[in-house]
Image (cartoon, grey):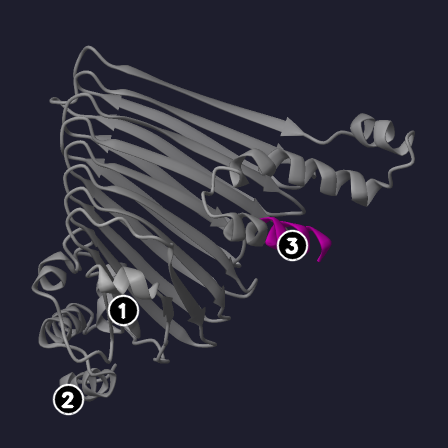
Amino acid sequence: MPDRSAAEAFSSLLREPAFLRKHRLSSLAFLKDHEAPVLAKSSPVIAIAEEDKAAGVCAFTLGSDFALPALESAFASLVPADDQESARHYAFLTGAVCIRIPTGVTLSYPVSIQWKGSEEWTSTHTVIIADTRSRATVIESFSGGSGSWSHVTELIAAEEAVIDVTSLQNADSALSLWMQQRSRIGAGATVTWNNATLGGKEVHHNLQSEAVGDSAMSGINWLFYAKGTERHQLSARNIFRASNGGGEILMKGVAEGRSHVIANGMIDIGLRGSGTNTYLTQEVLMLDASAKVDAIPGLEIKTNDVKASHSATVARVTEEDLFYFAARGIERDEARGMFVKGFLGDLVAKVGDESVREEVLGFIERKYGT
């Protein structure tokens, strides 16, 4: 493991501000008895429209010459370095981005953040700060990588903000990925997460969205597709700490070959969550008998006067289904592909940006064809 001076030298190389260096060094101390990964610097591509910059939208990356006080207070506030995995993430951070949308600003175009993984260790971090009554769409895409990748996205939405985040994960099939997503939603604000998990040999992806203000809305749409021997462990949790909240969790995916997916969905309504209206839906399509999906829905309700429900369904492509297509001149592989695209298509349609929808559909088609 590198010593403090080596970590400080790497921090200087990345030109990161003092508060990031502090997080790195304190996390390194937490991990002093653990083996260090091999570092590889990651340089994201960020696209922000010129008119949005003129409106005061700002982006911070490692290597920038400035840091926002808001970023310093937000960074690691939703995912603290209080366990081995998160401490490792901060200690060996290779790339970080902060997007802040000022009060009352509506972004004219989506903000696009493109992350590229390395062959060794990649550790990336995104902070999104949405001030009061701001509106924005943020798209994060993840590609490449054959080693290990750790990523955290933290989203803080102030009162009446409306934020849509799409996470498109199409990393290489040799990658091991640890991903955490967290959001804190203020009164009257709306946050929608659109996740597409389409790659990775081993994926541990945890999303937790917490509505802390009255009438806050939290929506989670999660599409996944595992094939071969891939192992995906996915967890979505909506937490309602204030009254009259709402939003759904929809997890929908396909398993093929000898893949295994664990899909956990949870609705958690606290003591002050009266008037909440929410539900959880899990739908799975099994292409092969050798594939396995554990769909695990759950409810934790600590108050009265709420509407909350959940459902989980599993469908299989049977030989009778394929015979039906064959009788109409459609080959077996083509028929299975039609099942995949048809099953996932309605969830893809929930992605607001047309170019991203087309990209997701293209990834699905290519994955099925490999």
Give the answer, above or below, for where 241 lies relative to 59. above
Q: Residues within 10 Å of mark 3 (few under 14, many from 20)?
A: some
Amino acid tagged 1:
Ala
Q: Which residue is mark 3?
A: 367
Query: Does label 1 or label 2 sit earlier along the sequence?
Result: 2
Give the answer, above or below, for where 238 lies relative to 233. above
Q: State the residue at coordinates (67%, 30%).
A: 316
Amino acid tagged 2:
Ser
Q: Residue furthest top?
A: 305
Left or right: 95, with 312 as reference point: left
Relative depth, front residue between 136 and 213? 136
Query: Does label 2 or label 3 sit earlier along the sequence?
Result: 2
Relative depth, front residue between 190 and 150? 190
In percent of width and height, residue 89 lies at: 27, 66
Amino acid tagged 3:
Lys
- Whether residue 289 is visible here, answered yes or no, is no
Q: Residues within 10 Å of mark 1 (few under 14, many from 20)?
A: many
In the image, which is nearer the foreground, mark 1 or mark 2? 1
Left or right: 311, with 83 as reference point: right
In the rendering, which numbered label is found on residue 183? none
**How many callouts does the rendering have?**
3
Q: Residues within 10 Å of mark 2 (few under 14, many from 20)?
A: few
As for residue 120 lying within the magenta part, the answer is no
Q: Are marks 1 and 3 in contact (CB under 8 Å)?
A: no
Q: Which residue is mark 2?
A: 5
Residue 52 falls in image quadrant:
bottom left
In percent of width and height, residue 221 lies at: 43, 37
In the rendering, which numbered label is found on residue 96? 1
Magenta segment boundaries in residue numbering: 361-370
